[in-house]
Image: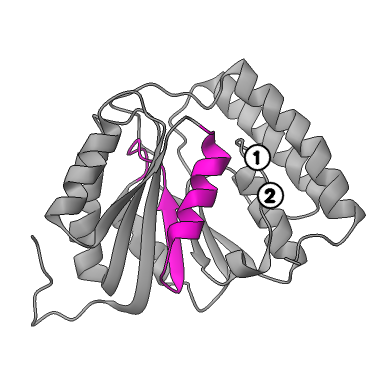
Amino acid sequence: MNSPDQDQPPRFDVALSVFFPCYNEAENIEPLVRKTRDVLDELVGDWEIIIIDDGSADETGRIADRLGTEDGRIRAVHHEQNRGYGAALRSGFAAATKPYVFYTDGDGQFDITELDKLLERIDQADIISGYRRNRRDGPVRRFNAACWGLLVQRLLGFRCRDVDSAFKLYKREIFDKIRLKSNSALIDAEILARAARAGYTIQTLPVTHLPRIAGVQTGAGLRVVLRAFKELLTLRRDIRGISEHFKV
């Protein structure tokens, strides 16, 4: 087990939960977790890593459990069946125990060493969101993502560059104040919209986006997209119609 150098105190006086939503990421999750552990040992003194196994059919769940036995600061949350990206994020936020929570996808397409850029701004906003300055996706996917981002911001009434970027840092208290419902890819927009309407602030900054080196991308499937559009219309009525963003 790696441990921080006692002569080099952590750079940030922050207790941090980090989680990775994963679906069939057996080839990616172990190197990502090991690299993240080393990064966290340098950045913060109190941390935990949570692996959300969203009903994976490969070895993701078993790898996650093994990593947890090697280091008590790492643990896994398992969905018996695949419940969707939104459900995976909701499980991650619910499992987080530290005052700040960060998540990025288990596919390794973001550079975890850039987490310090977000931590440097924790006193400037309640949500720090990294936007992909060099998005490593095809032109059709980039175009669809841009249109989707503009649409959800217009309909839900908030502003944030690169809504669906999976490189975000939040104050944990936000998730005690808002009620999340989305199980689909709409989850990022829902969080931002509900948080903004509850008075929380959002700041963005550029981060590096890397090509996927293993596994299969699933987020752009037709079924996933159609479900997200259906949820968007329902969510708009909820958020813009009545004040149900606070828990009751």
Q: Residue furthest top?
A: 222
Q: Is residue 107 magenta?
A: yes
Q: Residue furthest front?
A: 80
Give neighbour class at mark 2: few <14, some 14-19, many 20+ (Cα, 10 Å): many
- Look at mark 1 in the image and give the residue it sits on: 186
**Point 40% across, 31% down: residue:** 23
Q: Position of residue 183 (x, y in %)?
A: 61, 39
Q: Is residue 129 visible?
A: yes
Give neighbour class at mark 1: few <14, some 14-19, many 20+ (Cα, 10 Å): many
Q: Is residue 32 left or right of residue 236?
A: left
81 and 18: which is toward the camera: 81
- Look at mark 2 in the image and give the residue it sits on: 190
Q: Quadrant of the N terminus?
A: bottom left
Tell me which segment is drawn in magenta.
Answer: 83-110
**Which secondary structure, mark 1?**
loop
152 and 106: which is toward the camera: 106
Question: Is residue 73 shown above or below 82?
Answer: below
Q: Position of residue 41 (x, y in %)?
A: 20, 67
**Point 86% across, 62% down: residue:** 243
Q: How many marks?
A: 2
Q: Is residue 153 left or right of residue 74?
A: right
122 and 170: which is toward the camera: 170
54 and 141: which is toward the camera: 54
Q: Are marks 1 and 2 in contact (CB under 8 Å)?
A: yes
